[in-house]
Image (cartoon, rainbow, N blue to C red):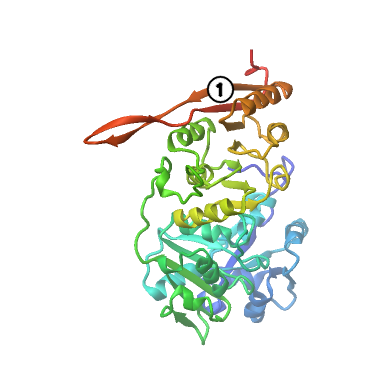
């Protein structure tokens, strides 16, 4: 039994607020019990359309309040009505616990003060119209404020990002749209990311209304240029099941690189050790400073499917190449900034892990800022190839009281010679891993 946060020990539990799912055919889809609660209610709360659909069934002396634009006030309306022993009903859409108002109300009222009477969800209806089993669908909602069009530098704070993220991990999606975040806007995002041909799309318009229409005969690219009647539900499904990609340890040759002499890329052996030292978790926020071709940051993004990677690179050619690698690898939880750190990184969220592959002469300032911004137990990893930068890094770590250690790594790779093979040495690299000093890890 859940604890009632709002009642004193000997108080009686008020009649619950009934959160009732309503569809666009109004009372036709309601159970007798749900309809009876609406007809007997003293106060009915709902959005404009729900109130209009059910208005004929309100009691003559019942009050009603429109929650449109006043959502945060609804819990207080309910508390006040229950304190006066009023019978309260909230009208929701479909299943109120599927991206609906019920979760919001239950988080602000004790659970005992609410009872949910669900209806069929619009996702279920859309799937039924198309004959698509929905038990393994990923359900997303963009039914919120206008997210705007998807842009090249758009990150995880964009309102459409959850949909893009879901396409990377699920073969079938259902999307609850809004008047602004429309099916064509979603389709344009998929086109922009180059994955539109991976999916088929269907749009269910005006479900349970006289002009209901199911559109499933256009491609995602075609949907990007069309307009659809609201309200609607979008279904996306892959034309072929997604392949399970290698998470990290990709061959250097799989990355596009700028090659003055050798590829400007963190080599596979160093990349693997550096990623291991970063102690990544599924939801880690990662910074990649001096991204180069993007190899470390992009592989980190694959290892943090519920996290995000923020990368910065000062060389314009490398920025273009890293962006190509991001697209080729199909990585979406990754944003690349063209600039010279530390400028531009103060707006990034605090990281659990930082990788510095290039410093642009700002190594001391970067070490100080990264150590300050790291979350508790976060790790700063640096790749150093010159003695001078090694000396600078150690001095900066000591100055900032960090706990640190150094691994010197030199790999040899086989090369053919006649009908045999010999080993050729790669350049040695110092890998430094550092954390803010605590009593437990203070460097001796």
Instruction: Indicate the position of residue 83 as horizontal and vertical percent values.
Output: 77, 56
Q: In percent of the image, x 64 and y 39: which residue is there?
A: 351
Residue 6 percent across, percent down from the top left: 73, 46
Considering depth in this image, is 17 or 401 the residue closer to the camera?
401
Residue extending furthest top? 444
- 332 with respect to 345 (left or right): left
Q: Identify the residue under disc 1.
A: 406
Viewer-proximal residue among 98 and 178: 178
Q: Which quarter of the figure has residue 412?
A: top left
- Residue lying at 68% horizontally and 44% vertically, measured from the top left: 349
Residue 342 higher or lower than 88, as above or below: above
Quadrant location of the C terminus? top right
Q: Nearer the viewer, residue 7 or 146?
A: 146
| Residue 102 in the image: above or below residue 381 | below
Residue 157 seen in render = yes
Quarter containing the N terminus: top right
Q: Secondary structure at mark 1?
A: strand
Q: Is residue 109 visible?
A: no
Taking the spot 36% from the left edge, 66% from the top edge, the residue there is 239
Measuring 50% from the left and 56% from the top, which residue is drawn there?
324
Q: How many marks?
A: 1
Which percent across, then down, holds residue 370?
68, 35
| Label 1 Cα crowd, 10 Å radius (few <14 / some 14-19 / many 20+) | some
Image location of residue 422, percent across then percent down? 30, 30
Foreground pick, 303 / 124: 303
């Amino acid at each position: 039994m859940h604890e009632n946060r709002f009642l004193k020990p000997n108080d009686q539990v008020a009649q619950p607020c009934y959160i009732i799912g309503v569809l666009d055919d109004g009372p036709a889809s309601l159970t007798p019990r749900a309809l009876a609660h609406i007809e007997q209610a003293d106060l009915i709360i709902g959005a404009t359309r729900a109130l209009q659909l059910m208005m004929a069934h309100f009691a003559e002396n019942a009050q009603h309040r429109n929650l449109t634009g006043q959502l945060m006030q609804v819990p207080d309306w309910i508390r006040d009505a229950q304190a006066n022993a009023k019978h309260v009903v909230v009208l929701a859409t479909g299943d109120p616990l599927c991206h609906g108002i019920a979760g919001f109300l239950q988080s602000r009222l004790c659970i005992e003060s609410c009872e949910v009477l669900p209806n069929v969800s619009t996702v279920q209806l859309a799937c039924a119209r198309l004959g698509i089993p929905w038990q393994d669908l990923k359900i997303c909602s963009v039914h919120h404020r206008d997210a705007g069009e998807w842009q090249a530098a758009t990150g995880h704070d964009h309102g459409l990002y959850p949909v893009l993220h879901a396409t990377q991990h699920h073969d079938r999606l259902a999307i609850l749209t809004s008047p602004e975040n429309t099916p064509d806007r979603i389709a344009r995002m998929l086109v922009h990311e180059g994955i539109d041909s991976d999916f088929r799309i269907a749009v269910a318009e005006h479900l349970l209304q006289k002009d209901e229409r199911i559109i499933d005969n256009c491609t995602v690219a075609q949907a990007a240029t069309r307009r659809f009647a609201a309200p609607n539900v979008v279904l996306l499904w892959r034309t072929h099941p997604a392949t399970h990609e290698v998470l990290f340890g990709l061959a250097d040759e799989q990355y596009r690189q700028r090659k003055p002499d050798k590829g400007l890329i963190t080599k596979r052996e160093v990349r693997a050790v550096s990623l291991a030292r970063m102690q990544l978790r599924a939801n880690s926020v990662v910074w990649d400073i001096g991204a180069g071709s993007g190899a470390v940051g992009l592989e980190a993004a694959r290892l943090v499917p519920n996290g995000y990677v923020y990368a910065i690179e000062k060389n314009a050619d490398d920025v273009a190449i890293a962006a190509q690698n991001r697209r080729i690898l199909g990585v979406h939880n990754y944003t690349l900034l063209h600039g010279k750190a530390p400028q531009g990184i103060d707006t990034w969220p605090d990281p659990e892990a930082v990788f510095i592959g290039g410093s642009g002469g700002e190594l001391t300032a970067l070490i100080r800022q990264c150590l300050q911004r790291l979350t508790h137990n976060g790790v700063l990893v640096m790749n150093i190839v010159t003695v001078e930068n090694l000396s600078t890094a150690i001095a900066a770590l000591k100055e900032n009281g960090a706990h640190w250690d150094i691994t010197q790594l030199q790999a040899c790779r086989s090369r053919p010679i006649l009908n045999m093979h010999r080993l050729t040495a790669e350049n040695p690299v110092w890998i430094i891993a550092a954390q803010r000093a605590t009593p437990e890890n203070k460097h001796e």
